[in-house]
Image: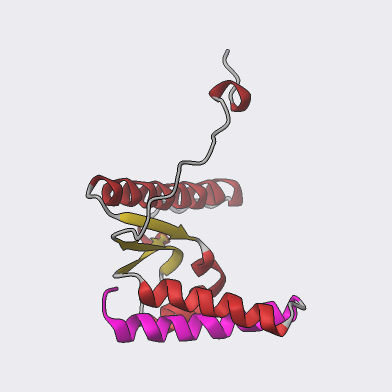
């Protein structure tokens, strides 16, 4: 999405869901408004917002729940792999990218707002543009501390 009106419509619609959920969680009003403002700004200020969706309609179908759930997990993993490739490609082009998973909490709202096919399940949103600043890399755990070598 690069169209300002589409991004604004989406930000407003998602903000309604977000506010409802935060109120239900008992979050104080001033904190809710700050979170909603930040959320809207992320969507509307990015030069491009890319919505990643999962579509199970072409996936294999199984008669048992175990394999059907495995097929869904494979589809989710594939979508995540596509998201990773998108971020690597933006970086290779000198762009900045941020991955947000909160579309998972507003799938129906997103589908309605953007008139997406019913089979499309929003999984993540990517905000892409030229970075204002490049942060210092975070310290990472050593490979030995997070892996088991056999």
Residue 75's spot in the image, x, y percent?
Answer: 44, 51
Which color scheme did the rendering employ for the protein?
secondary structure
* Circle count: 0
- What is the span of residues highlighted in magenta in the rendered image? 1-25
- Determine if residue 118 is in view: no
> In which image quadrant can residue 4 be found?
bottom left
Residue found at x 32% / y 52%: 86
> In which image quadrant can residue 47 be found?
bottom left
Vertical position of residue 128 compared to residue 107: above or below: above
Specify the quadrant that holds the N terminus. bottom left
Q: Is residue 17 magenta?
A: yes
Vertical position of residue 117 compared to residue 127: above or below: below
Residue found at x 25% / y 45%: 92
Residue found at x 42% / y 78%: 111
Please tell me which residue lies in front, 1 or 74.
Answer: 1
Residue found at x 45% / y 67%: 121
Residue 109's spot in the image, x, y percent?
Answer: 49, 81
Q: Main secondary structure of the magenta part?
A: helix
| Residue sitting at the far top | 150
Q: Is residue 94 magenta?
A: no
Residue 103's spot in the image, x, y percent?
Answer: 49, 69
| Residue sitting at the far right | 26
Please tell me which residue lies in front, 58 or 10.
Answer: 10
Please tell me which residue lies in front, 126 or 109.
Answer: 126
- Determine if residue 111 is in view: yes
Q: Is residue 89 left or right of residue 103?
A: left
Q: Is residue 93 left or right of residue 88?
A: left
Q: Is residue 80 left or right of residue 144?
A: left
| Residue sitting at the far left | 93
Specify the quadrant that holds the C terminus. top right
> In which image quadrant can residue 50 be found?
bottom left
């Amino acid at each position: 999405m690069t169209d300002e009106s589409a991004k604004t419509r989406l930000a407003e619609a998602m903000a309604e869901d977000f506010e409802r959920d935060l109120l239900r969680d008992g979050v104080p009003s001033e904190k809710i408004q700050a979170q909603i403002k930040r959320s809207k700004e992320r969507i509307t200020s990015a030069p491009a917002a890319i919505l990643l969706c999962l579509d199970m309609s072409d996936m294999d179908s199984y008669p048992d729940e175990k394999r059907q759930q495995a097929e869904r997990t494979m589809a989710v993993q594939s979508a995540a792999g596509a998201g990773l490739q998108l971020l690597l490609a933006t970086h290779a082009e000198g762009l900045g990218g941020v991955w947000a998973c909160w579309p998972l909490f507003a799938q129906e709202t997103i589908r309605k707002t953007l008139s997406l096919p019913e089979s499309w399940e929003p999984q993540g949103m990517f905000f892409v543009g030229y970075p204002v600043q490049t942060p210092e890399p975070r310290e990472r755990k050593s490979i030995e501390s997070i892996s088991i070598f056999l």
